Image: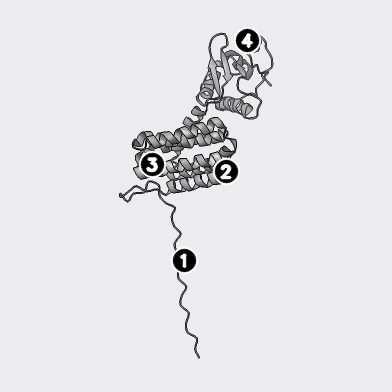
Amino acid sequence: MLRLMTDSKRARQGRAGAETASATPAWEPVHIETLSNQLIQQIRDSFLAGRLKTGDYLGSERSLAEQFGVSRVAIRDTLRSLVAIGLIEVRTGKAGGAWIAAGNISHYADLLSIQLRMMGVTELEMVDAQAAIEIQATGLAVLHAGPDDLARLEEFVARLHASMNEPEVFTGLAMDFHALVVQASKNRALSAQFLAIRQILQSNYSLHARQDRAERTVAFAQKMLAHFRARDAVAARNEMAARLAHIRTATLDLTGAYWLEPEPQAAPAPAPAPRRARRA
């Protein structure tokens, strides 16, 4: 397996060795008809299996071509694709070459939100996903929140109250409050997924901002803050679940059109047929 370098000095030594030595390629041979896909698959699989990690040096374009036994054009195409999905970064200069990139939650959220839109995921599905993420995150957040988390929640409760007459500002702050709750869980997987969902849902929420809804949102935020202070995870989860259930079934005021369609109700069971009177 290719020996990985994690600091600049070792990386330069590794590049020099890879450029001059004629060692056996560290990667598996590939077939020309699926060349780029196979190269991407090998590097991706090595990363997911833990053989590569953030900060590892893969090599220069030339050394990678030698290791894989392919052309530099094929390596260039592969690196371009890996950069696009955020797995590597390509540097120039003395520290030039391909490196395993650091995680970027915003990049992940952008990709996921775009894919969800392309898949045609409905608003109802998104709100259900929001509930699954936030209810779980809330229980963790109450247990893991530190003084800084509580201070930020208090700040946003005050800002929400002060911006009730500014619908667009208020909606952004309301989503910020939900994001702070998820962040307080200290679970980065939940935070990343919530960020992606937020990018899709916030525009919908902004369209339907209303004074009475703003008042309910502020009341909800105040109750959540009280549950956090009391370290009552059960009450906080129940509060979040009730709030998201209300949001799920919210309708536009008098238009008759549903913002989020309610769950279809099961058809009532047919009434049993009347019994015939028994003959004497």
Rendered residue at 54%/39% (across/down) = 229
Residue under label 2: 233
Residue 242 visible in the current orientation: yes
Rendered residue at 46%/48% (across/down) = 245
Viewer-side residue, 177 vs 108: 177
Give the amino acid at mark 3.
Ala
Q: Which mark is residue 269?
A: 1
Q: Which mark is residue 239?
A: none
Viewer-side residue, 68 vs 249: 249
Residue under label 3: 214
Q: Which mark is residue 12?
A: 4
**Of all residues shown, which one is farthest toward the bottom?**
280
Quadrant (top left/top right/bottom left/bottom right) for the N terminus:
top right
Instruction: State if disc 1 and disc 4 touch (CB < 8 Å).
Output: no
Give the amino acid at mark 4.
Arg
Q: Is residue 141 above or below residue 35?
A: below
x, y percent for residue 72: 55, 16
- In front: label 4 or label 3: 3
Secondary element under disc 4, as helix, strand or loop, is helix
Rendered residue at 66%/18% (across/down) = 4
Marks 2 and 3, the one that precedes in the sequence? 3
Give the amino acid at mark 2.
Ala
Give the amino acid at mark 1.
Ala
Instruction: State if disc 3 and disc 2 touch (CB < 8 Å).
Output: no
Instruction: State if disc 2 and disc 4 touch (CB < 8 Å).
Output: no
Marks 4 and 3, the one that precedes in the sequence? 4
Q: Give the CA separation, mark 4 to mark 2.
A: 51 Å
Q: Give the CA separation, mark 1 to mark 2.
A: 40 Å
Secondary element under disc 2, as helix, strand or loop, is helix
